[in-house]
Image (cartoon, helix red, strand yellow):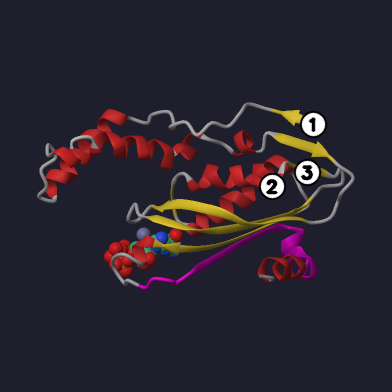
Amino acid sequence: MTVAEPHAAEPPSGFDHGRIEKAVREILIAIGENPDRDGLRDTPARVARAYAEQFAGLGQRPEDALTTMFDADHDEMVLVKDIEVMSTCEHHLLPFHGVAHIGYTPNEKGRITGLSKLARLVDVYARRPQVQERMTSQIADGLMQVLEPRGVIVVIEAEHMCMTMRGVRKPGAKTITSAVRGDFRTSEATRAEAMSLILRG
Ligand SMILES: Nc1nc2c(ncn2[C@@H]2O[C@H](COP(=O)(O)OP(=O)(O)OP(=O)(O)O)[C@@H](O)[C@H]2O)c(=O)[nH]1
Ligand SMILES: [Zn+2]
């Protein structure tokens, strides 16, 4: 079993609270608000604290999430479904949210990771300005790099607030992205098995 550093959701290095506060104050003025009124006085600092959480993944690497690995006598698919994903679209800085499904086939040593670590890996990439496609690939590549499994499949289903509360205004539209690596890419049967488990309600 390998145990590395813990994985706190700390702001990334270079994160500048004061600068965010100034910028948010400017935005409030620019929309015609009074940033000094009661309800808004603390808003710039609140937004800076919120961004420190929302973008904490910028300071993290996949190995910060995948801290626990075991060699188990298991070389068949492991799949964790319905991992909640909350991210921020990099085009509008509005949230998108949904679920991730992550599967992998352990390598010949039977190396597996703690189930919660897969959810932590999602957060490493979700807590950044993102597009859903890139996040999906990064999760797959991060898992391949650190766990060295025979293959990985990542499927993400999400709803984007930038399509819901503004712009085209289509609530309920879901974007589904997938990334397959290793045997999920080369073997149609392995991929089909995973997809049938993922699609089963
Ligand atoms: N492929 C992809 N597109 C995204 C994602 N998040 C937001 N978008 C899209 O990014 C695009 C940005 O388009 P632009 O035309 O530059 O911006 P816009 O004028 O605000 O676009 P509308 O949203 O259509 O009003 C929009 O079509 C969004 O729906 C994502 O994760 N992946
Ligand atoms: Zn957007």
Q: Residue most toward the front?
A: 38
Q: Position of residue 190 (x, y in %)?
A: 78, 65
Task: Provide residue 195's location: percent of width, then percent of height.
Answer: 70, 68
Rounded to the nearest whole Å, what is the CA distance between mark 3 and mark 2? 12 Å
Taking the image as shown, residue 11 lies to the left or right of residue 169, namely right
Report helix, strand or loop for mark 2.
helix
Lower sequence index among marks 3 and 2:
3
Q: Amino acid at mark 2?
A: Met
Total label count? 3
Which of label 3 and label 2 is nearer to you?
Answer: 3
| SS for callout 3 | strand
Q: Earlier in the sequence, mark 1 or mark 3?
A: 1
Viewed as shown, does residue 159 lie left or right of 100? left
Name the residue rendered at 53%, 35% in the picture.
60
Residue 1 badge:
1
Assign ligand 2 to one image quadrant.
Answer: bottom left
Of discs 1 and 2, which sits in the foreground?
A: 1
- Looking at the rendering, in which quadrant would you find the N terminus? top right
Residue at (74% x, 70% y) in the render: 192
What amino acid type is highlighted by mark number 3? Ile
Residue at numbered disc 3: 112
- Asked if ligand 1 lies within 8 A of label 3, the reply is no
**Mark 1 → mark 3, Cα distance in angstroms:** 10 Å
Where does label 2 land, which residue? Answer: 144
